[in-house]
């Protein structure tokens, strides 16, 4: 599968999290890992539900770019 890389995809994903009504998600980070050609979602949240919501927000943004999403969020 060929990946369609958009240079601003990590920034777009970060902005989608920043606009979330769940304040915890605003402090999460999205980075592109060019070695594995994935977006990595990291940071920490207080519950598994918020981890899932963050994942789905970022997945919606990167769907067209055909990038894999790695959810490395910690639940504390």
Image (cartoon, rainbow, N blue to C red):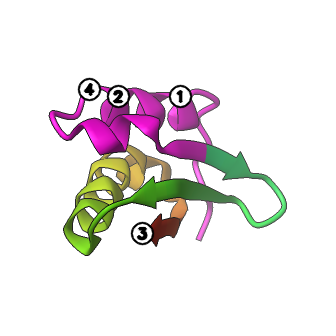
Q: Quadrant of residue 54?
A: bottom left
- Which structural element holds mark 2? helix
Q: CA distance from mark 1 to mark 3?
A: 25 Å
Q: Quadrant of residue 31?
A: top right
- Residue where numbered disc 1 is placed: 11
Q: CA distance from mark 4 to mark 1?
A: 12 Å
- Residue where numbered disc 4 is placed: 19
- Which structural element holds mark 1? helix
- Magenta residues, start to end: 1-30
- Residue where numbered disc 2 is placed: 18
- Mark closest to the chain's N terminus, 2 or 3: 2
Q: CA distance from mark 3 to mark 4?
A: 22 Å
- Residue where numbered disc 3 is placed: 76
Disc 1 residue crowd, few under 14, some 14–19, many 20+, Cα 10 Å: some
Q: Say if 71 sits above or below 26 in the image.
A: below
**Disc 2 vs disc 1: which is toward the camera?**
2
Residues at marks 4 and 1 touching, judged by CB atoms closer than 8 Å: no
Q: Nearer the viewer, residue 7 or 75?
A: 75
Q: Nearer the viewer, residue 51 or 56?
A: 51
Disc 4 residue crowd, few under 14, some 14–19, many 20+, Cα 10 Å: few
Disc 3 residue crowd, few under 14, some 14–19, many 20+, Cα 10 Å: few
Q: Say if 31 sits above or below 16 in the image.
A: below
- Mark closest to the chain's N terminus, 4 or 1: 1
Residues at marks 4 and 2 touching, judged by CB atoms closer than 8 Å: yes
């Amino acid at each position: 599968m060929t990946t369609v890389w958009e240079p601003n995809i990590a920034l777009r994903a970060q902005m989608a999290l920043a606009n979330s009504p769940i304040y915890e998600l605003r402090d999460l980070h999205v980075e592109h890992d060019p070695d594995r050609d994935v977006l990595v979602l990291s940071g920490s949240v207080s519950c598994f539900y918020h981890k899932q919501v963050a994942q789905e927000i970022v997945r919606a943004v990167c769907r067209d770019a055909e990038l894999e999403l790695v959810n490395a969020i910690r639940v504390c």
